Amino acid sequence: MALPININDLVNGQSIEWERLEFKQGWNPEEIVHTICAFANDINNWGGGYIIVGIAEKDGRPILPPVGLAPESLDRIQGAVLTLAYQLLPNYFPLIQPYVLQGQHILVLWCPAGDNRPYTAPISQGKGALRQAYIRFGSRSIIAKEDNLRRLQELTARIPFDDRINGKAAIDDLDLGLIQAFLQEVKSDLYEESKQIPFADLCLNMKIVNGPKEALRPLNVGVLFFSRNPEKFLERSWIELVVHKDKTGKNFSEKYFKGPIHHQLRAVLDYFKNNVIEEAVEKVAHKAEANRHFNFPYEAIEEALSNAVYHKSYEMDKPVEVQIWPDRIEILSFPGPVPPVDAQILKQNKRIVARDYRNRRIGDLLKELHLTEGRGTGFPTIRNAMKENNSPEPVFETDEQSTYFLSVLQAKEQIIKVDKKDILFTNLEELSRYLKNRNDLATNLATNLANPNEIKENVNFESITNGATNLANDQATVGAEPNKIKKNSDLKDFTVGASVGAGNLAIEIIESSLNDKVLAILNFLPEAKRRVEILEHIGLTNQSFNREKYLDPLVKLGWIELTIPDKPTHKDQKYKRTIQGEILHKLITR
């Protein structure tokens, strides 16, 4: 019976890490029994491994096309494998399947992690040979000694939760359609066989049930992937998504994603694609190609969310929580990482190689579906995706007791629609540059008026106004009469047609970079006002330090100006909004 895996992906290390693969050009019983023992012991809870006989290797990688095995030797080798299996104590039996790869016969031994660790094997094939427990160390099978032996002994009868029997579910709670859809997607040869063999045999061959054949029960991994309603058997095994409309935390909506966990994962990722991720195209002067980037890179979201689904404990009735804020995404799962990974290690900007894994089977199925990467590559993948998008560095966090794991992805920038164009500002400098550009357009228009009602012939009005300027509801008039402007037009009525979202973003940037009094000051200055009037309006005393903190920065930015600029201390001195200030006021109050 075929294995529930794509043989081409397996041989090329695309779904299983190289450390879990061993290639043998020919039959070598002594080395093979040691490797079977090592995979059965599965000291790191990686999920066992595969021995592929008939393919030579170099530096742990296969040499293709395969050398292959003689067809007449296949039956003999399969019988020899069973003989070797009896040499292990306790007895352990791998699954054996012959394949034809690139025209050559090979034999694959699937050695899942055993349930009765530790296993021992004879160190040689001679009679009376000593027995030792073997484990995997990198790509080699070695004898477990000292600390490793103690670790292995501590794993006795300790089966990861995803590989345990679920006492609430029956084999009939597993769905044949879901199983076949999985096998078809991963292009396993077992898909065609699944149409003919008994359902119990199919589940046994996929290692998603266990127990005596007359009373088989699903494993938790089987319930999570192949039950229509896994939350019936594992409480709160879903993903909760909260979308915040603003930063207050009071205006939000909730969504629950249930069903098989790989369906949940894909549904949430689709939600991000369709509702959250936005692309910005920034044209650069003197450069043919535009710069393209996203508010959040999809690859980083995919990896962070997949890691949460992979590494959370399904023994705890706590869902994966995803919070989408205007400026960041937070992905929370419980508990925290498995030792030796801790809060300090998470802060290090380098690859993290875990020694132990919480879910040895969930990871394998997610890798088969290409929903997560190989062991230890999650953090670099997220960091690289954020870096390539010029986004802030991601944050990975846990507490000293490792009770939770939090991934935070900061937005590169908000993408806001203004005048049917994308504008971007993530800080005060970008906002000020945007306002200055608008101011320059307005000034250009004003200085080119031959008189209040005429535009010089050499001025391209469309180029000045396209997507940028309107003069106080004159769009229709200008459209009808390109060289006329209404007499009641005034630059103080200059508008930008900005969206509410752009205004909210501008307020957030101003408040974080300056203070929360800016909008109140701009609101108070449709006409020029004295300093004492402005400060009293915002609840402050007429002191120099208040002027320096609240008024001087706005003058420096060019958003307000002095009515008598050459005499700052003049007794009749007042403040008024500049054209930039008018634009900003329209932007944040629209």
Image (tube, rainbow, N blue to C red):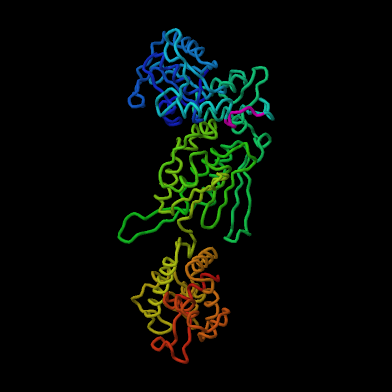
Quarter of the image that includes the C terminus: bottom right
Residue at the spot x=48%, y=55% of the render?
A: 411
Q: Is residue 289 left or right of residue 404?
A: left
Q: Residue at x 54, y 71 (%)?
A: 516
Residue ranking furthest to the front: 146
Nearest the camera: 189 or 396?
396
Task: Classify 150 as above or below 465.
Answer: above
Using the rendered image of the protein, determine whether residue 223 is visible from the camera's viewpoint. Answer: yes
Q: Is residue 165 magenta?
A: yes
Where in the figure is residue 280, as x and y percent of width and height?
A: 44, 56
Asked if residue 102 is positioned above or below residue 337 in the image, the reply reads: above
The question of residue 540 being in magenta is answered with no
**Along the line of sight, the residue nearer the viewer: 143 or 369:** 143
Residue 45: image location, x then y, percent: 51, 30
Q: Where is residue 154 shown, x and y percent of the image? A: 54, 28
Magenta part of the chain = 160-166
Left or right placement of residue 195 versus residue 137 in this view: right
Q: Position of residue 272 (x, y in %)?
A: 53, 48
Q: Residue furthest left?
A: 286
Whether residue 302 is visible: no
Front residue of 16/89: it is 89
